[in-house]
Amino acid sequence: MPTVAELSRERVDHRFKSLPPDAEGRTLGELAAERRDLFEGGFLTPVLTLLAPALEHNLDQLEHYAHDHRLAFAPHGKTSMAPQLFDRQLARGAWGITAATPWQARVYRAYGVRRIFLANQVVDPAALRWICAELTSDPEFRLVCYVDSVRGVELMDAALTATLDVVVELGVPGGRTGVRDEAAADVVADAVAASRWLRLVGVAGYEGEVPEKTEDAVTAWLDRLVALTRRFDAAGRFAEADEIVLSAGGSAWFDAVAKAFEPVDGLSKPVLRLLRSGAYVTHDDGHYSEITPFHDRVPAEGSLRPALRLWTQVVSRPEPDRAFLNAGKRDAPYDLGMPVPQVIRGADGSLRPADGLRVTKLADQHAFVELTPETPLEVGEWVGLGLSHPCTSFDKWQLIPVVEQDGTVTDFVRTFF
């Protein structure tokens, strides 16, 4: 089994976008030890970077928020698919890491993650056989996954050869997966009780699927989730569980989750109140900057800072009111808004605000920038872009330099997509 530390022994070569050509053959650890300057050290553009102080700040914020609200924390790993970040999250007290698919769970296991919350129903026999092998070979490994249908329970039970902990997923009409009402939840729970290999240990869901994105609507759904947990417990459905898992929580409503879960006491077993926010680790400059609870609902309880920045260069100024940067859809997310120009680095190394610049469109490898004829912007200058949506930022980069505030590159984060 590889370790996170061994990632630093990987050799730099053509597989990794934007690394210095003269670093070919060095290990990532050796390159990091050189502490090169991002702008003068041979890095190619475009290059996605992680700002070290912001990353550390964000890790700290959710660690303390979860602790203060009696929440266990299983951050969603699909955001970054970066074992180095998982390692830092676990070191800060995370219960485990959340996955969306079995292949993601395989990456987690390859780097030693001992607890995985798999937020999906698994019906692939090959995946279920792999899960059984992992559970059997490592008594300290725990995996909990969703169930939301009788047929799913039947398929899982037919493929399993070891006991698997499951939670009934509560969804919403018109939403994603999950049972639509309490009656359907009872039917699925009955199927689990009748199975050979499945053990019902809780209830879970994702409040982000609630159609009406208001605090009242989200709270009402969370109250249903809590009520279903209490009803299952009163009916003795968790008799075989060691603890009762109650889980929800993306990056937009973790305050509502904390409030709804806080009074859940007095059940027949200890309750694991499991929060699963993932995008917090890098935050962003768009979508999540607006919807995080720290923005307007609970600003006194914490803050998050954008840690992702995509550095590009101006490669063309063919018209007075238009410029082109050398980054596009292959480099930057665009599903939740266009990248936002934030800072310009001039030829002399000075930084100035990117006032008057607006990205209007992305091609595969170009960003279309609208500006006024009077805007000072020259071919060759670097432009730092703020990004919206961490999940579709990480998946475009296998290796991301970690930089200090002054531009010194001190580490590299490896992703697995």
Image (cartoon, rainbow, N blue to C red):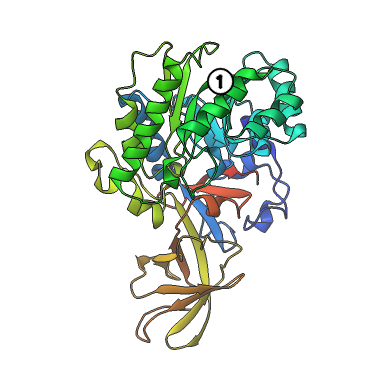
Out of 293 and 132, give the one closest to the viewer: 132
Out of 80 and 227, give the one closest to the viewer: 227
- Report whether 302 appears left or right of 331: left
Kind of residue at badge 1: Leu
Question: Where residue 275 appears, x then y in whole percent?
Answer: 43, 31
Q: Quadrant of residue 341?
A: bottom left
Question: Where residue 83 appears, x then y in whole percent?
Answer: 59, 35
- Report whether 82 appears left or right of 257: right
Residue at (47%, 46%) from the top-left corner? Answer: 173
Is residue 124 in sight in this rendering? yes
- Report whether 331 appears left or right of 123: left
Q: Is residue 353 above or below residue 124?
A: below
Q: Circle 1 sits on which residue?
A: 200
Out of 92 and 38, give the one closest to the viewer: 92
Q: Is residue 160 above or below residue 60?
A: above
Are there few (<14), some (14-19), or many (20+) residues within 10 Å of tag 1?
many
Question: Where residue 37 appears, x then y in whole percent?
Answer: 51, 53
Residue at (46%, 76%) from the top-left corner? Answer: 369
Residue at (28%, 43%) from the top-left corner? Answer: 216
Residue at (64%, 49%) from the top-left corner? Answer: 398
Question: Where residue 413 appears, x then y in whole percent?
Answer: 57, 43
Is residue 87 in sight in this rendering? no
